[in-house]
Image: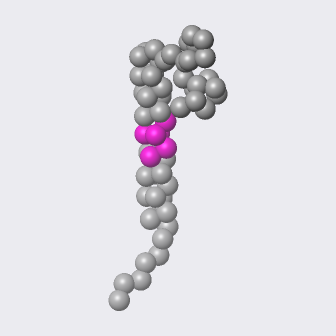
Amino acid sequence: MVKLLNDGEILYGKVGNQRGISLASAIGYKQQRSLKRREILKELAEFSQEEELHETRVYS
């Protein structure tokens, strides 16, 4: 979590030496991560289907 904050992935405010994260920032990060995961899974599914079409299988 600290890495995400330090890298600027999640916006936060600081009071003293403690970090505070707004609910909007947390939800925004979650939505962004979910969107990225769906895009990657879609690409993986497309790649898998393409490879399956090119694959030669021998059944005995």
Up the image or down, 12 lies above or below 4; here it is above
> Magenta region's main secondary structure?
helix
Q: Which residue does the image show at 53% across and 31% down from the upper left?
A: 1
Q: Considering depth in this image, is 19 or 25 the residue closer to the camera? A: 19
Q: Where is residue 57 in the image (x, y as percent from the top left)?
A: 43, 78
Residue 2 visible within the image? yes
Up the image or down, 58 lies above or below 34; here it is below
Span of residues in magenta: 36-41
Instruction: From the viewer's perspective, tell me whether residue 31 is left or right of residue 13.
Output: left
Q: Which residue does the image show at 35% across and 89% down from the upper left?
A: 60
Q: Considering depth in this image, is 28 or 51 the residue closer to the camera? A: 28
Q: Which residue lies furthest to the right in this view?
A: 7
Q: Which residue does the image show at 41% across and 22% down from the upper left?
A: 27
| Count of marks overlaid on the render | 0
Residue 11 visible within the image? no
Instruction: From the viewer's perspective, tell me whether residue 44 is left or right of residue 16.
Output: left
Q: Which residue lies furthest to the left in this view?
A: 60
Q: Please tell me in which quadrant of the rendered image residue 7 appears.
A: top right
**Residue 20 magenta:** no
Q: Position of residue 28 (x, y in %)?
A: 45, 21
Instruction: From the viewer's perspective, tell me whether residue 38 is left or right of residue 13.
Output: left
Up the image or down, 52 lies above or below 20; here it is below
Instruction: From the viewer's perspective, tell me whether residue 35 is left or right of residue 1.
Output: left
What color scheme is it?
A: one colour
Q: Considering depth in this image, is 19 or 8 the residue closer to the camera? A: 19
Q: Please tell me in which quadrant of the rendered image residue 17 appears.
A: top right
Q: Which residue does the image show at 49% across and 55% down from the upper left?
A: 47
Q: Position of residue 11 (x, y in %)?
A: 55, 18
Up the image or down, 22 lies above or below 47; here it is above
Q: Where is residue 25 in the image (x, y as percent from the top left)?
A: 47, 18
Q: Residue furthest bottom?
A: 60
